[in-house]
Image: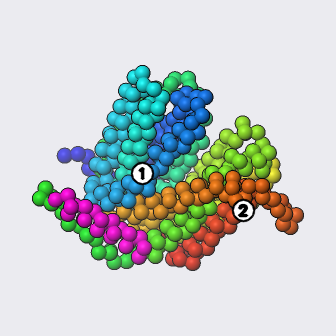
Amino acid sequence: MGATPTLPTAHSKRATLINRDFAWLWSGQVVTDLGSVVFNTALVVWVAAVLARGQFWAPLAVSGLLLAQSLPMLLVRPLAGVFVDRWDARRTMLWMDAIRAVLAAVLLVPLALPLDPIRQLLAVYGVVLLTSACGQFFNSALLTLINDLVPEADLSRASGLSETTWSIASVVGPPLAAPLVLGLGIECLLILNAGSFVVSCLTVWVIRPHHPVKRDDGPAPRVSREPWGPTVDNADIGRQVLNELRDGLRFVMGNSTVRTATIAISIALLGAGVLHALDYFFVTQSLRASPTLYGFVGLAFGGGSIIGALLTGWIAPRLGVARTFIYALFGVGFAVVLLSRQTSLIPALIVWAALGMVNSTTNVALTPLLLGATPRELVGRMNALFFTAISAASLLSSASAGWLASGVLRGFSASLLGMRFGPVDTLLTLTGVLICVGGLYAALGLPCKSSVG
């Protein structure tokens, strides 16, 4: 019959990991987060330094890898939200972990065969694309399961723990990736990656979710929910999927909290993508630092992110998640503007650490903010549409940054109030201003409560 479900209680705040089921869920994500960061970084190193070594098409091969990881965020995630709202979240996560473990193992076959590099690269692209597609279902179901396992008053702490885990993985993972893939080979990394999905699958399997508590900020919207039985043809199912996707879009646009948070983050990411695309050139050109020191950027940002995530789990329930989100978004904008004015590496790294703190604060506050405004039956679609919107904004920003820096603003130089502006630092300044615009939009549109719950 299975174990007795673990119900959230009034004493959950005394437990470090909130309750038994969330502790299992978090433990599995510790392993998969680290495994994913190491493997994704190792793939880039392997493609660039081994498979396409010395080839003129090596940069294009790496770009294709990143594209294969990103495309499902735009193409699959909206549909994943529809199905996740219909399916059992725990069972969905079990299936996605199992499929991803099999995909990692299957990739061993073409890499072991004497195929030419192009065919091996295409096999890698295919597996990365399918794995990322499974990840869209898994991540939407993960948010739904957290919603079922964690009391509303503990959502900020749960979000903080998850953000801390990802931040630690982002700091520890990349330095491990290159030595592991170059020393052990990509085959060993594939086995370890498959093993991380197996661990996640086992930790999800022992979870027994309690009956979900409905959370919303008003009457539930109309939801199309006709049965998909064996007598329903594919055309009817297709129409129903579109109807349910439309219901999700109607909710996102109609709910003031979700709509405001989505638009605010999208505005911010229209600028933040610039930072991701140009941070290397900022370090080597504006700061005049050696390329070998570029890795310290990730270390400073990740270290700040860990501190910010830990602090936010304590601050947000007291200040209120809406206020925390707004203040942190302004903090990100101000930090980027301050960063753009730096001319040497050490002060810039200090600012990068502060940027990591306020950025992780934004992320931690965002989860309880969205879940607190969303009916349980719409969590999957809300999550899918939210991430589709912000992924599109980030990709557009990253592409525009390269075009502006290498084309429109190439050779640009100006002075204002004794400060010199070049192409890269000018774009970073505009990035900070745009993020502050997102914060202002959030401040005008979000209802600020003194605390959660």
| Disc nearer the start of the sequence (1/2) | 1
Task: Pinpoint residue 316: horizontal percent, then vertical percent.
Answer: 55, 64
For the point 42% across and 73% down, the residue is 253
- Indicate the quadrant where residue 375 lies: bottom left
Task: Pinpoint residue 323: horizontal percent, then vertical percent.
Answer: 57, 70
For the point 52% across and 69% down, the residue is 263
Residue extent of the magenta highlight: 233-254
Label 2 packing within 10 angstroms: few (<14), some (14-19), many (20+): many
**In this rendering, would 150 be left or right of 303?**
left
Task: Please give the count of numbered marks on the rendered protein.
Answer: 2
Q: Which residue is mark 2?
A: 429
**In this rendering, would 333 be left or right of 197?**
right
**In this rendering, would 207 be left or right of 410?**
left
For the point 72% across and 50% down, the residue is 282
Is 239 contained in the magenta span? yes
For the point 36% across and 51% down, the residue is 137
Using the image as rendered, state which of residue 183 and residue 15 is in the foreground: 183
Viewer can see residue 319 = no
Q: Are marks 1 and 2 in contact (CB under 8 Å)?
A: no
Task: Pinpoint residue 16: horizontal percent, then vertical percent.
Answer: 48, 50
Q: Is residue 114 above or below residue 27?
A: above
Task: Pinpoint residue 353: horizontal percent, then vertical percent.
Answer: 68, 51
Judged from this view, the residue extending furthest toward the left is 231
Q: Amino acid at mark 1?
A: Pro
Q: Disc number at residue 72? A: 1
Which SS class for mark 2? Answer: helix
Specify the principal SS of the magenta part.
Answer: helix
